[in-house]
Amino acid sequence: MKMESDVQSNFENGDREWPDGFFIRWYDRLGNLKSSFSANYVYFTKAENLYRAEGDVIVKSFENNDELNTEELFWDMEKETFYTDKFVTIKSDDEVHTGEGMESNEDFTEYRILKPNGTFTLEDDPNQPSEPNILIKPAAQEK
């Protein structure tokens, strides 16, 4: 891991602050770039062992080329996870996924949007019949 920042403030209680944000890169054992994390402002709380990133928060996986954008993100370094309850946008190849809340592993190769929304592209399953065998009717409207 390599971290870059212009300013870091260290406090007596062990908390740290990066008022101008920071940029982190993770590498594999061979030195290949795996993922990155950047934000405009970051605060580390020692008592909780938790980083809170704010502003233009971006997490990118160079393994699957997915990129997360959000306004607030928590990084639990001990559990090697990211999470948020804020709105997220994830760009994945030629798709864009959006929703409220997200959890992911630290290298952003596995993630879950908690409340997804938007338009989704579904591929046909070649093992299923081409004609649907289930009829879906709209719910009755209340009067």
Image: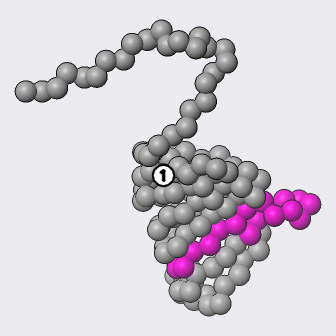
Specify whether residue 34 is painted magenta: yes
Give the colour scheme of this rendering. one colour
Given residues 98 and 32, the one toward you in this image is 98
Depicted 70 relative to depicted 11: above or below: above
Given residues 108 and 52, the one toward you in this image is 108
Residue 5: x and y in percent read 66, 85
Depicted 43 relative to depicted 30: above or below: below
Residue 3: x and y in percent read 72, 77
Residue 72: x and y in percent read 47, 67
**Residue annotated with mark 1:** 98
Tell whether 54 sits left or right of 37: left
Tell whether 94 sits left or right of 113: right
Q: Residue at x 73, y 51 (%)?
A: 64
Instruction: Name, please, the residue furthest toward the right.
Output: 30
Given residues 72 and 76, the one toward you in this image is 72
Label 1: which secondary element: strand
Specify whether residue 36 is painted magenta: yes
Tell whether 93 sits left or right of 51: right
Q: Which residues are magenta?
A: 25-44
Q: Residue at x 65, y 68 (%)?
A: 37
Name which quarter of the figure residue 6 lies in. Answer: bottom right
* Amino acid at the residue labelled 1: Thr
Q: Residue at x 53, y 86 (%)?
A: 19
Q: Residue at x 48, y 9 (%)?
A: 133
Name which quarter of the figure residue 142 lies in. Answer: top left
Which quarter of the rendering shows the N terminus?
A: bottom right
Depicted 29 relative to depicted 40: above or below: above
Residue 84 in sight: yes
The 10 Å Cα crowd at callout 1, few under 14, some 14 to 19, many 20 or more, is many
